[in-house]
Image (tube, rainbow, N blue to C red):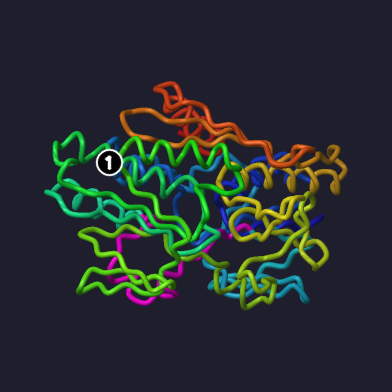
């Protein structure tokens, strides 16, 4: 019986487990490993900032997974040994025939001196809740939303946070006394989306009087003086600083020597295989290039799609279904405040190059975003 180990129970890992559940009875021994006890989508943090929900809303416990034939191991991975096909956790030794690494990205604010001390972390729920409370009492000044480096997960997220902060301040009646600035090393918002989408996002920012400063890579943050210094020598002072910190593969993955100079695991686009046989990497931990040379964006919707493809590949290996072709299709939703969201429909592997279409913001777009979360939580977890 084939032993399949999935490391990480995020979008990709949950998708693979769900797809393999039936095959896990009699044809394969499937194990899903995660150090966390529960799952929550990143969009929940945006809605906490916007005041739409509390921090623990949207959480689902892994003990309530719908997969009845997949073994869930609540433990931390401490070593990956591809040469011996062994995974070591704090309490287990897991041997495998097929391995899927879906451990996501590690946040590394320490790569920018002073960032951890001076900024709210836009990828951490407790920090976003603190940012919500700070914005709720802000009475003017300057809010800086800072993208520290690329790549980072969920390309629209920093722009959504800037727009949501604008919305909160407008509702509180203090927006006229507050500047909002967004700085990024990127040449435009969401570069893989193309110039038209980038220009549309810039227009949204301008409409909301959010200053956009591209090509700005931070060198250091002085938390006491509240000043960001950039690599070009320029500076930006702030009242409140909220940051998308640097990302890289988790330490245990880097120690396994699966990563390259990018800090992530290089895999073949379309198969998601690493250089090691029967080892796959999907989602935020993977380094992927599109056919035109652009980096494949890191986002939950694409991690889900990659997980579905790898699951189908494994099912074909087990003789229970045909493999499928990865298309790089997906939809994400840019939350612009005012209870509206703008859908972005992507076809990354279009024959003529990536095709992304940004639709106008609407209440229906936000309803679709809510439905996106609801459908997946109902699929993966029991109520």
- With respect to residue 277, does 54 lie above or below? above
Q: Is residue 229 left or right of residue 317?
A: left
Q: Which residues are magenta?
A: 102-124
Is there any visible trace of residue 382 in the rendered image? no
Given residues 105 and 314, the one toward you in this image is 105
Q: Residue at x 31, y 53 (%)?
A: 128
Given residues 279 and 330, the one toward you in this image is 330
Q: Quadrant of the N terminus?
A: bottom right
Mark 1 burial class by Cα count in 10 Å: few <14, some 14-19, many 20+: many
Where residue 170 appears, x then y in whole percent?
A: 21, 36
Where residue 329 appears, x then y in whole percent?
A: 67, 37
Where residue 161 appears, x then y in whole percent?
A: 36, 46
Residue at mark 1: 166
Residue 374 magenta-drawn? Answer: no
In terms of secondary structure, where does tag 1 sit?
helix
Where residue 323 appears, x then y in whole percent?
A: 83, 41
Rendering quarter of residue 350: top right
């Amino acid at each position: 019986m084939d032993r399949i180990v999935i490391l990480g129970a995020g979008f990709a890992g949950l998708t693979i487990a769900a797809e393999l559940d039936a095959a896990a009875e009699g044809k394969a021994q499937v194990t899903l490993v995660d150090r966390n006890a529960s799952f929550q989508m990143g969009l929940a943090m945006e809605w906490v900032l916007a005041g739409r929900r509390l921090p623990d809303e949207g959480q689902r416990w892994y003990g309530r997974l719908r997969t009845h034939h997949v073994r869930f191991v609540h433990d931390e991975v401490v070593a990956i040994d591809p040469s011996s096909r062994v995974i070591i956790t704090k309490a287990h030794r897991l041997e495998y025939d097929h391995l899927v690494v879906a451990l996501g990205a590690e946040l590394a604010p320490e790569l920018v001196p002073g960032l951890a001390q001076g900024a709210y972390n836009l990828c951490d729920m407790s920090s976003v809740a603190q940012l919500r409370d700070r914005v709720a009492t802000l009475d003017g000044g300057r809010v800086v939303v800072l993208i520290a480096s690329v790549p980072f997960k969920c390309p629209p997220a920093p722009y959504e946070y800037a727009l949501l902060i604008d919305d909160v301040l407008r509702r509180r009646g203090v927006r006229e006394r507050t500047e909002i600035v967004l700085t990024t090393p990127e040449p435009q918002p969401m570069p893989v989306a193309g110039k038209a989408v980038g220009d549309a996002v810039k227009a949204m920012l301008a409409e909301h009087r959010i200053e956009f400063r591209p090509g700005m890579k931070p060198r250091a943050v002085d938390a006491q003086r509240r000043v960001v210094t950039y690599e070009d020598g320029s500076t930006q002072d702030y009242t409140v600083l909220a940051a998308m910190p640097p990302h890289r593969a988790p330490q245990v993955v880097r120690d396994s020597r699966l990563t390259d100079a990018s800090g992530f695991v290089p895999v073949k686009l379309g198969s998601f295989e690493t250089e090691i046989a029967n080892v796959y990497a999907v989602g935020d931990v993977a380094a992927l290039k599109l056919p035109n040379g652009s980096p494949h964006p890191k986002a939950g919707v694409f991690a889900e799609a990659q997980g579905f493809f790898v699951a189908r590949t494994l099912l074909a290996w087990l003789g229970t279904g045909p493999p499928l072709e990865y298309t790089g299709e997906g939809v994400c939703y840019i939350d612009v405040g005012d209870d509206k969201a703008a859908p972005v429909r992507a076809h990354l592997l279009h024959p003529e190059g990536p095709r992304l279409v940004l639709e106008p913001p609407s209440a229906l777009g936000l309803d679709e975003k809510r439905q996106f979360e609801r459908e997946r939580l109902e699929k993966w977890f029991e109520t």
